[in-house]
Image (cartoon, grey):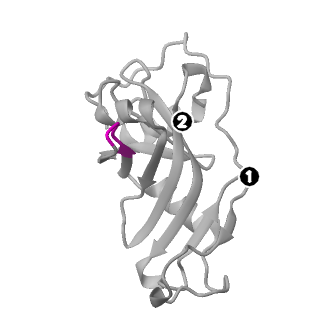
Amino acid sequence: MPARKTRNQSRSSKFVRSVSAPQPKSPKSSRPVMPPVYGIPKTRKGSLPWEWARKRLTNSHNYLITTVRPDGRPHCMVVWGIWLNDAYFFSTGSTTRKAKNLAANANCIVCNEIVEEAVIVEGVARQLTVPEIPESAFQLYHAKYGWKLDPKMGPVFLVTPRKVIAMPEKLFPAGATRWLFD
């Protein structure tokens, strides 16, 4: 979440955004690996379509991001962000624990806010340069939160998913689904 609110002004024209967000290939659907006692089906019957997870990641207002401290201890924090082109964009202060952790270890987990329809993204974060941030990310962030996604306030990160797991409570165990990204 931003440290301070900025006035609704148009972005500086010196920020030219020419690179669009990465477009991962469609993820491959399978089942999460869990002990047999959970009753996860061996077939994909009842598994969820990727659009189910994408909708929940897009519509979430608050997200949880888990990073790893240099000594191996986890760090989890609420953060604002947007799901765009099958990737997660967020910003944070450069001196925050999560920014320091990601500088040392880019592996992280991002979760949507509604745990009854949990979507868990295991991915790799990287700090973006201003030209790498898609124009639509600025527009979506402002429309969602009423705040500017402002690289001058702190770095903007992109989390590219490696694996996503859905654990919908009301559809469990048949709805438990895993998607793998190349």
Q: Please state the horizontal and vertical placement of residue 145, each as a whole percent of the image.
A: 37, 41
Q: Give how far apart the Cα atoms at labels 1 and 2 are.
A: 20 Å
Which label belongs to residue 25? 1
Q: Residues within 10 Å of mark 2 (few under 14, many from 20)?
A: many
**Res 147 seen here:** no
Residue in the foreground of this view, choosing between 119 and 33: 33
Q: Is residue 84 left or right of residue 154?
A: right
Range covered by the magenta-colored residues: 67-71
Q: Residues within 10 Å of mark 1 (few under 14, many from 20)?
A: few
**Which residue is depicted at the point 44% across and 22% down?**
151
User: Mark 2 = which residue?
Assistant: 137
Queried whether the magenta region covers residue 104, the answer comes back as no
From the image, state whether disc 1 or disc 2 is nearer to you: 1
Label 1 sits on a secondary structure element that is loop
Question: Magenta residues: mostly which secondary structure?
Answer: loop
- The mark that comes first in sequence, 1 or 2, is 1
Q: Is residue 129 above or below residue 138?
A: above
**Which residue is depicted at the point 38% across and 48% down?**
65
Are the residues tagged 1 and 2 within 8 Å (C-beta)?
A: no
**What residue occupies the far left of the structure in this picture?**
4
Q: Is residue 171 above or below residue 70?
A: below
* Quarter of the rendering containing residue 44: bottom right
Q: Quadrant of the N terminus?
A: top left
Which label belongs to residue 182? none
**What residue occupies the far front of the structure in this picture?**
71
Q: Please state the horizontal and vertical placement of residue 93, each as a whole percent of the image.
A: 33, 27
